[in-house]
Image (cartoon, rainbow, N blue to C red):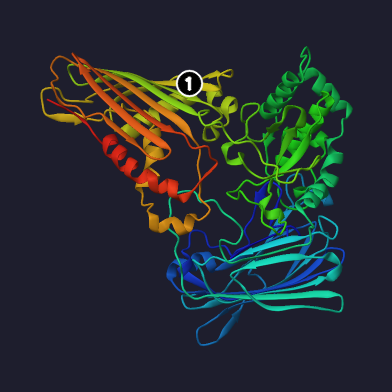
Amino acid sequence: MSRTNIIFLSVLICGVLNFSPARAATPEESFKYAKYYDSIVVNADGTQDEKVTVSLTILRADALEGLKQFTIPYSTSAETVDVLEAYTQKPDGHKINADKNNFQLDVNGGRKGAAPAFSDQSSLTVVFPEVSVGDTVTVVYDKKVIKPLFPKMFSSLWTFSRSGIYDDARIHYSIPVSLHAKYESFGLQETENKKENGRQILAWTFKNLTVKKKKFVAEPVEEIGDDPSLAVSSFPSYEAMAKAYGEKANPKAKITKQIQVLADKITKGMATPRDKAKALYDWEIENITYAGNCIGIGAVVPRDLDFVLQNKMGDCKDHATLLQALLKAGGIESTQALIGYNDIYTLPKVPLMSVINHVINYIPGMKMYLDATSGMPFGYLPMSLSGKPVLLVDGYRKGATTPKYPINLVRLKIDAKVTLTKDGAADGVTTVAESGPLEASQPYEQGRKNLTAETLKEDGEHALEESGYQGSVTYEPVIWDEKTMTYTFSIRYHLDDYVHPGTPGAFDPEPPFSPEYIAASISPVMEGLTKKDNDQLKHGYVCHGGFVGENYQYILPKKMNVLAVPEDVTASSTSQTYSSHYALSGRILTVSRELKDAVAGPTCASEMHDSLIPMAKKAWTDLKAQIVYK
């Protein structure tokens, strides 16, 4: 079970923190929620008094390590936590209370009472005594919100997983009627809904006694309500949410003398607004590093820009605020925008801050979105932010979304030439060109092109070691072409005993050290997605189009007789086309493969994945084909 709550500070701008006991990698069926009670009293000013009871029964030994302790996260500046009870209960009912020394308090704060530089997220951890399989560990605690982030505003989301066991879960709310709270539940049983003494009293229960496992390989599009859940919010609308954030963030984007001097220096000699905006954006992604700080009051209020510039670091809201100020100093109006770094493409009816956890910028005059934390080329967002709902802080537009990626924008091309010697060695060079704003390859200039000679040498040594061959491997520096958004790198290698001419054998058409882009695209389909899994993909799955091309040339030694080469293959589906071609002319063997994906994205219907299965099977067989020689 996870809970996200803007007042609770579990999920705020730039990140998500799940509310759950520490149980890393523990299968859900290894324990159960014997009891989960959460009672929240919201006050008229937005402060809260909450009492939580969690009882977890250990069903298998693999849950022991994770459930010997329970961690309660909280914001030092906005919340207080007080553990009322903590104990281990044996199957016969005997209780062993946690000793006063069984508590670990980790507090983040500033020096001598000053505000923390990074985060005020703190935690209180309870260590349970004498825990064994069959025991139930229980913690009861009070949590108070003493400093609401937004006056009279809060939003909370509970999500229960059907892959976990819940004997008894209860959520109870008491909210002033004056806050006009909205709520929506999915798969929970409403047990109370009334108004008395100026308060709205709401209650739900949930049980799940049988584990239901999910099985899918594709990345599913999610919506609130896919799992049993409860959403409660006093935000009247998403527009009000954007406005509330802007009231705290916009004053931080003021033009100071330092900001004006810096903007003038960066844009000196530039005439057009686009050139200035690009220069300011490029400067920021190269000079201001990312430092996550998404908990506490700092989760909503950006830091002072003097601090950001002095330390050359900040989180997403700091980056967005700095870029907004620099753009304004350069005569370019912009606004910050709230967006979700998740797989949710439809905002829930009840306004929830938990689905809007990232901040970017929007330049209305250029109709352009920018994410200064991503390192993406100017003018492009990461793929995971394309086609997503976005809340403009200024100039709010209901239903606004970020642009979708052009279908053929992403192109991957691999070329290789390999000469096989008479003694079976291989001398070759593989060149990889990646074009388009490839999120998985970020950051572009900050990382790849700045690799040192020593790092490149180490990478080559590691690649050789992983290959299992003897010889040498050299990685060459990356070449970045900003105009075509293409970076290119080459790998040169000499491998001893790659083949054995004169004796029967076979080798892969794909040369060593070639990225397996096509295989990586097809393998998820081959890992078990079938039509029976589509109930898990009822909103579709995340998808993007693109092109992958492979062209390989082998120069064969005279002693090698090629006995067989694979036959050409063509296979297609609703959206994808795969083709391969093999040709032997004298001592020259050429191999070409292509995979074209014409989906518009960023989401595809589950039926489209079904259409991929026949094509994927045919392509997968071809990818495993070999060149047979003697």
Drawn side of residue 534 relative to residue 379, left or right: left
150 and 109: which is toward the camera: 150
Seen in the picture, residue 48 relative to 274 is either above or below; the reply is: below
Please tell me whether mark 1 sits on a helix, a strand or a loop: strand
| Residue 150, image x, y percentages | 82, 55
| Vertical placement of residue 319 versus 358, above or below | above
* Local crowd size for mark 1, using a 10 Å CA cut-off: few (<14), some (14–19), many (≥20): some
Which residue type carries mark 1? Answer: Thr
Position of the C terminus by quadrant: top left
**Residue 122 coordinates in the image, percent (x, y):** 71, 57
User: Residue 291: percent from the left, percent from the top?
Assistant: 68, 40
Residue at the top extreme, as displayed? 269
- State the residue at coordinates (80%, 23%): 263
Residue of label 1: 488
Q: Nearer the viewer, residue 1 or 79?
A: 1
Residue at point 26%, 39% (across, down): 621
Q: Residue 151 in the image: state x and y as whole percent.
A: 86, 57
- What is the quadrant of residue 627 in the picture? top left
Outermost residue to the front: 574
- Counting the numbered discs, the total is 1
Q: Is residue 597 visible?
A: yes
